[in-house]
Amino acid sequence: MEEIKISAIQMNAKPGDKKSNIEKAKELIKRDVKEDTDIIVLPEVWNIGWVPSLFQANAEENVYVKTKKQLFTNDILNRQVGSFQHKVLTEKNPSCEFLSKTAKEYNSWLIGGSIISNLSGNFYNTCPVFNRKGELVATYSKNHLYSYYGCDEGKYITKGENPVMVDIEGVKVGLTICYDIRFPEIYRAYRIAGADLLINCAAWGLKKPIPWECMTRSRATENQTYFVALTQSGLIKDDEWNIGHSRIIDYKGETISEIKDQKEGAMTAVIDLKSMHEFREKCRCIDDIRENYEVKIL
């Protein structure tokens, strides 16, 4: 595809209230997403909110795809040789059931922000990806866990092992979650692997506006890649707030769609892949990367 249409949902999740948050996501998608949308994106832990102490109690079972062809799950999919067959999701996985049905209903790919997955007693902050048929085709588990300034994600969650890039009808999409944004190495690895689009699904704190502004724009410009920077909005608890201000940034670092404040809803943009690749051909920064950056200490 030379162009793809993306809608990303900014929302405020009520801590621990999965049923309410699923209904909210459903209503926001129904209100703001058009039927011709190619990709729908949700933010980090949209279904339970950013309260790490609640993560394990609200985990969904065995949401995991090892490779494109080999699937290791319990309640979601049956494994087949050479392909996979979708199975009706059980009541253990209401968020995934919602994501699957929504992808199928809107005939869109759905990048499910992140949910907490329980895989054999290990808990992961996992981004599930569903295709237009509602089939789970990829999962990425957060590689970097934020455990500073009173936040203790690493106490409850196991970090993922590697980056995951999913092929969406020929468009290569690199997946990251929140704190991953502080590690440019993962985005450079995606770019070298051929990424066309980078996505960061977050629940970013209001007290860190400068890092959010600088790093999201930097990850787009340094990799000459479209970047979806999607975060939650609104109150978390007490005096903790999500920052809101989600943005879609183009390969030159310009914002092409955004939600500036705390409101809930969709930001939508058409990603022009043809113009991006033409720009890359004129300015081949990727070719100037050196194999070795050994530091000389004098």
Image (cartoon, rainbow, N blue to C red):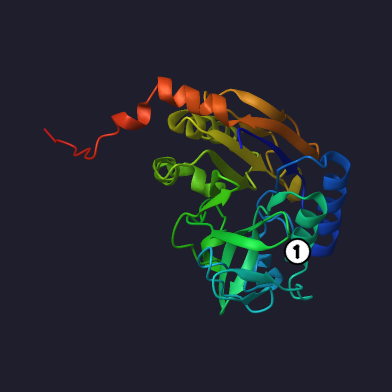
Which of the 4 quarters of the picture holds residue 265?
top right
x then y, percent, for residue 139: 58, 61
Give left or right: position of 23 versus 212: right
Crowding near pointer 1: few (<14 within 10 Å), some, many (20+)?
Answer: many
Q: Is residue 202 left or right of residue 35?
A: left
Q: Which of 1 and 201 is in front in this view?
A: 1
> Mark 1 = which residue?
95
Quick check: 167 above or below 87? above
Q: Nearer the viewer, residue 43 or 168?
A: 168
Quarter assignment of residue 242: top right
Q: Where is residue 167 in the image (x, y as percent from the top left)?
A: 55, 50
Label total for image: 1
Residue lying farthest to the front in this orientation: 82
| Residue 159 placement (x, y as % from top left) | 49, 63
Secondary structure of the residue carrying numbered label 1: helix
Between residue 68 and residue 263, name the one nearer to us. 68
Quadrant where the C terminus is found in the figure: top left
Q: What residue type is labelled 1?
A: Ser
Instruction: Specify whether residue 297 is in view.
Output: yes
Q: Residue at x 55, y 24 (%)?
A: 275
Indicate the position of residue 135 as horizontal and vertical percent values: 69, 63
- Residue at the left extreme of this rendering: 298
Q: Is residue 170 above or below residue 16?
A: above
Q: In which quarter of the image is the N terminus?
A: top right
Answer above or below: position of 141 versus 84: above
The answer to whether residue 17 is visible is: no
